[in-house]
Amino acid sequence: MAYNTSPGAGYMQQQAGSPHGDGQDKGNARAKGITSCTIRQILQMAPSQGNNWRMDGAEFAVVKIVGVIRSVQEVTSHRTYLIEDGTSQITAKAFGPVNNADLREGVYARITGPVREFQNVRSIHPATLHPITNFDEITHHSLEAILTHLQRTKGSLQDRAGGAGQPASSLLRSHAQTGDLSSLATQLVTLIGSSPDISFDDIRDQFPNATPDQLRNVLTDLTNEGHVYTTHDDDHFKLTSG
Amino acid sequence: MAQDEAPSEYPPTPRVNNSMLAANVDRFVRLVGTVMKINQSTVTIRTSDKGETIVHTNSNAVYAEGDVIEYIGSVQPDLSLVAETFAPFPKSFNMDNYNTMIELARKQYHLFSAVPY
């Protein structure tokens, strides 16, 4: 089975799986952010409490996995992708048009979306589904999954002396810190986080010295990295965590 | 039967390097390496931990010395790999970071595998 590393971006509008709102029910805490994890972790989670899932004791709204598309089945209303990441396999059911022919068997892809369960079978309803173009993302994603797990189960890196050795700790720290983001990206994250839903036009007004293309490129990177996501159209943004 | 315990069309394939092969004989693994030598259907690769592994492949596979390839296959008693499938990786792939990651992953094996590897 041959893979393909053709560049490209695939983005789909998700019909189902709206973000969780602030719970007015006392027992329904707000789930936050994107959790990088393995498929095995998704399948091993305890059953959800309503719409909220917990992994390592922390609630989350959306997962991110990186794996190989092993099969694609298309019916009238949706496409079903079977994703395998070396730990297990899971289906991702995508509704709406898919504007990327590179999302085919044998391709490594990054998928973000909420987890759903129906008749004891879990799947992901992808909010984003992109073929990866930088294969170091495979390394990065696994490190993110390890880091997230360790932070949730053993505390933050700052609280733990030693760790897994100098090179590994440095690598984890460099991926964990938002200092990895460019200055413009950091400013965009701050601006987007200050508003419940901000338009691209409002963003552009705040950055008169940046070209629209520069802003678009950085926003695309932030979306791909899971820091922000688009809301009711591609020109409105919301911060993922917070 | 829980979903993660059901028979899978794609069994787990932990990411390993050359030094981990001995602990995974008769198991399917994922091995990434740089092609050093090609001899018909046998390929010698340099793995992420700078070891050398012999991979038995389909002779129709098309790649060249210097290519970075991810193999999925079963580890043989002689620590060679019989490849079921392969994927080309870019030559820019950072093998050092990858090796660090798989060594870390092995210490947190429960995130990646039901059993240590």
Image (tube, coloured by chain):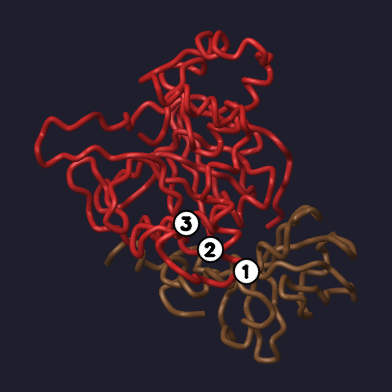
Chain colours: A red, B brown
SS state under label 1 = strand
* Same-subunit check for callouts 3 and 1: no
SS state under label 2 = loop
Say if mark 3 contacts mark 1, CB within 8 Å.
no
Check the residue under mark 1 and report the chain it is in: B
Residue to which mark 1 is pinned: B30
* Camera sees residue A176: yes
Of B28 and A1, the residue lying toward us: B28
Identity of the residue drawn at 37% across and 55% down: A42
Identity of the residue drawn at 67% across and 70% down: B31
Please tell me whether residue A125 is drawn above or below residue A174 in the rendered image. above
Q: Could you give the CA–CA distance between mark 3 and mark 2, rounded to whole angstroms?
A: 14 Å
Q: Nearer the viewer, mark 3 or mark 1?
A: 3
| Position in image of residue A36 (x %, y %) | 45, 50
Q: Could you give the CA–CA distance between mark 3 and mark 1, rounded to whole angstroms?
A: 18 Å
**Mark 3 or mark 2, earlier in chain:** 2
Q: Residues within 10 Å of mark 2 (few under 14, many from 20)?
A: many
Check the residue under mark 2 and report the chain it is in: A
| Position in image of residue B46 (x %, y %) | 80, 73
Figure quadrant of residue B74: bottom right
Would you say A44 lies left or right of A26 here? right
Identity of the residue drawn at 47% across and 67% down: B112
Q: Residues within 10 Å of mark 1 (few under 14, many from 20)?
A: many
Quadrant (top left, top right, bottom left, bottom right) of the N terminus of chain B: bottom left
Residue to which mark 3 is pinned: A145
SS state under label 3 = helix
Q: Could you give the CA–CA distance between mark 2 and mark 1, rounded to whole angstroms?
A: 8 Å
